[in-house]
Image (spheres, rainbow, N blue to C red):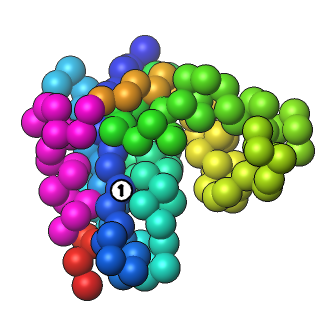
Amino acid sequence: MREFEIYTDGSCRTIGNMGSGWAYLVLERRKEVFKDSGKGLVENTNNQMEITAVIRALERIQSAAVQNVRVKIYSDSAYVVNCFKDNWIGSWKIKGWINSKKQPVANKELWLQLDVLAQKYKAIFQHVKGGSNSYNRIVDRLAKKESKI
């Protein structure tokens, strides 16, 4: 079984959410396999970009037709990590996509996409402190660069 480590980040300009970006870095045995970044829509939120970064990384693995894969995803977004580690997503599905505050889950369409991919690759999510290692710093720089208008 092949094992990939994926580092992701999303960025959104804090002043008026004007400009957003995402980035990922996929490693196998500490060697770069895939890396990419892109711009989001002007009206995207940081949370949307954080989710998008993970989706894009998993889609890249899927498009390369890599078989028999397990992934470990490192993100500085507690929103993304806790959704899977604390099984928020399972609770949302059971409750008809209603959150603990009895409100519709934000970003449902992105979560649906990510859930399918995360299950396919038996994804394990791990929180990393922002800027805590060189890989996290790489994706942070790329995502911030993409968020510039």
Query: From what the image shows, is residue 56 above or below residue 83?
Result: below
Q: Is residue 129 left or right of residue 82?
A: left
Quarter of the picture holding the C terminus:
bottom left
Residue 136 belongs to the span the image colors magenta: yes
Residue at (33, 45) in percent of width and height: 8
Quarter holding the N terminus is top left
Query: Which residue is pictured at 33% across the width and 39% down the height?
Result: 76
Amino acid, disc 1? Gly
Q: From the image, tell me which residue sits under label 1.
A: 10
The quarter holding residue 7 reads top left
Instruction: Tell me the residue at 22%/49% (across/down).
Output: 139
In the rendered image of this protein, does residue 75 appear above or below residue 14? above
Residue 113, percent from left and from top = 64, 50
Q: Quadrant of residue 96?
A: top right
Element on which disc 1 rests: strand
User: Which range is magenta?
Assistant: 129-145
Residue 142 horizontal/vertical position (percent): 19, 59
Q: Residue furthest left?
A: 134
Tell which of 139 and 67 is nearer to you. 139
Question: Is residue 90 shown to the viewer in this render?
Answer: yes
The extreme front residue here reads 101
Q: Residue at x 18, y 68 (%)?
A: 145
Task: State the residue lying farthest toward the top.
Answer: 1
Instruction: Give the image quarter of residue 129.
Output: top left
Residue 103 sits above or below residue 121 on the image: below
The answer to whether residue 33 is magenta is no
Mainly helix, strand or loop, the magenta region?
helix
